[in-house]
Amino acid sequence: MFMRRFIQLQSGLCLYGVAAALMVRANLGLDPWNVFHQGLSLRIGMLHKRVLKAHPKLMRPSP
């Protein structure tokens, strides 16, 4: 049961990522978080996928 649900979750997340990537490539418009990441990548000159990976590290509260 767990493995089936886990595979379904991973498949859904993969499809969501593919859909977001296709929307970026086709210039169709983006959902709010991707708009933020796309604007940030254009502003600082990084690739969109690198901003997606770096964003959670930048948003940590300082101790």
Image: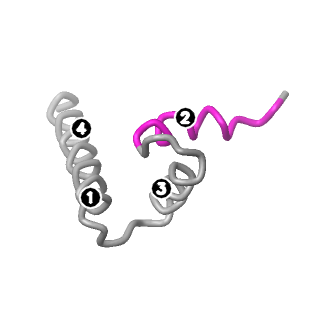
Determine the main secondary structure of the stretch shown in magenta: helix
Q: Position of residue 23 (x, y in %)?
A: 28, 63
Mark 2 or 1, closer to the camera:
1
Crowding near pointer 4: few (<14 within 10 Å), some, many (20+)?
few
Q: Where, quadrant-wise, is the N terminus in this rendering? A: top left
User: As displayed, is residue 57 above or below residue 44?
Assistant: above
Q: CA distance from mark 4 to mark 1?
A: 23 Å
Q: Report if the CB atoms under discs 3 and 2 are less than 8 Å apart.
A: no
Q: Where, quadrant-wise, is the C terminus in this rendering? A: top right
Q: Quadrant of residue 3?
A: top left
Asked whether 52 falls inside the magenta stretch, the response is yes
| Residue interval drawn in magenta | 49-62
Mark 2 = which residue?
A: 54
Q: Tell me which label, 4 or 1, sits earlier in the chain.
A: 4
Asked whether 45 falls inside the magenta stretch, the response is no
Crowding near pointer 3: few (<14 within 10 Å), some, many (20+)?
some
Mark 3 = which residue?
A: 38
Q: Secondary structure at mark 2?
A: helix
Q: For the point 18% across and 42% down, which residue is it? A: 11
Q: Position of residue 62 (x, y in %)?
A: 81, 32
Mark 1 = which residue?
A: 25
Mark 4 = which residue?
A: 10
Q: CA distance from mark 2 to mark 4?
A: 21 Å
| Amino acid carrying mark 1 in the image | Arg
Q: Tell me which label, 3 or 1, sits earlier in the chain.
A: 1
Mark 3 or 2, closer to the camera:
3
Q: For the point 28% across and 48% down, which residue is it? A: 17
